[in-house]
Amino acid sequence: MLNKTQNLIKYNKVLTKVISLLLVIVLSFIVTFVSCGITLGLKVVYNGETIGVVKSHKTFDKAVAYIENNTQHLKVGTSIDKASFGLTLTLADKFLNKTQLAEKIAENTDEIATANILYVNDKPIAYTDIKNVEELIEKSRCRYYIDGAENNAEFIDTIRLEKVFAYAKRVDGDKAVKEIINNLNVKTVSKVSFEAPIAFSTKTVNTSAQYIGYSKITTPGKQGLASKTELVETVNGNESSREVLKNEVLVQPVTQVVLKGTAINMATATEKAQAQSAGLILPLNTYVYISAYWGDGRNHKAIDFAGKRGTPIFAAQGGVVTCAGYRGNYGYLVEIDHGNGLRTRYAHCNALCVKVGQTVKQGQQIATMGNTGRSTGDHLHFEVLKNNVQVNPAPYIFK
Ligand SMILES: [Zn+2]
């Protein structure tokens, strides 16, 4: 009996020790869990996917109600599936709230999309589920920035996004939405600094020491350089105003000086008297203007009279026709030998009225004005030759 009692006391002592040990172990586990923030929660399994952990079933019911109250154009009959729940250990800060869970449910329901409504001046313009829509809008705002400038831009309209759940099939296509975003009206103000050339001006100096048509640059013009700062305002990339903030001349431009000939006739009095004594007359009764003088900056060895096709051309002096036909660059050409080493030529004619060897009187019609040979318009190219060399016709035909 004593032996039995002794054994029981011994057994109780051992049991107490074991229970105490277990208690210590369990307590230390709980202390560890709590101190690490680990707690019990419910994992939500929706449409076969674990979508998060909640504190209680009620969060799911609230999320469903939230979706139903906040879904745009939800098709009648769209149903949110039932969820199943399972106990789990979790960190307290991993619990989803109503709205977070609602987004997860929407992501896992084919008919519902988490979307944004894009409002322009409080008018809904697009439904979109593009994830980086805010970033795209920001890009659009800055789309007319000028490289290297200080830029600022703002939308002309009031742009606003509202996060909603939308019936998935009502969400607009990404391409269409991006186009809308990239066409939002935007005003951009850019402060641009740059260096710009300053055009040079040209000064003409006339000289009677050269024939009309003579032109020579005596001082070449040089562009200057300016340092400019301008405030450029654009609306949708189109410049709407520009304000010059700074315009500093760094290098002054150099004015170009051009020497221009004014002389028709530079013959001396003796030379002119000699020419006049040949008694030549103007080979035309009528012309529109003189299109080229002697010399004329391109070594033009004649005087050109521009006029109408078919205008009669007369012999400047009596003589014998030495050429009447087509001659390359001259086109239809008449040449008359007046004796004393003096000849005249009439080029680019339309039609000829004389033949080689024919004697013509002064003032007799020999041809009509035309545009044959190397010629860019109806005109008479009139040459005077003295001893087989072209000379300026002006002293011969102008008084
Ligand atoms: Zn000519």
Image: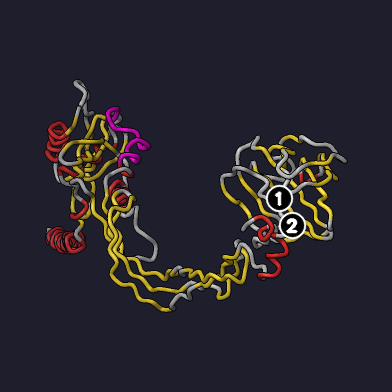
Which region shows up in magenta? 168-180
Residue that appears at 21% across and 29% down: 82
Amino acid marked by disc 1:
Phe
- Number of residues whose C-alpha sits closer than 10 Å to that of mark 1, classed few (under 14), some (14–19) or many (20 or more): many
CB of mark 1 near ligand 1 (< 8 Å): yes
Q: Position of residue 55 (x, y in %)?
A: 15, 46
Q: Position of residue 307 (x, y in %)?
A: 60, 42
Assign the magenta stretch its main secondary structure.
Answer: helix
Q: Nearer the viewer, residue 250 or 211?
A: 211
Which residue is the site of mark 2? Answer: 278
Indicate whether residue 175 is drawn in magenta: yes
User: Mark 2 or mark 1, which has the lower sequence index?
Assistant: 2
Can residue 7 be seen? Answer: no
Can residue 30 be seen? Answer: yes
- Is 364 situated above or below 239? above
Q: Which mark is residue 382?
A: 1
Residue that appears at 76% across and 49% down: 345
Amino acid marked by disc 2:
Ala
Residue that appears at 38% across and 76% down: 249
Residue that appears at 78% across and 57% down: 385
Please count the marks in the image. Answer: 2
Indicate whether residue 325 is drawn in magenta: no
- Is 274 situated above or below 117? below
- Is 252 situated above or below 234? below
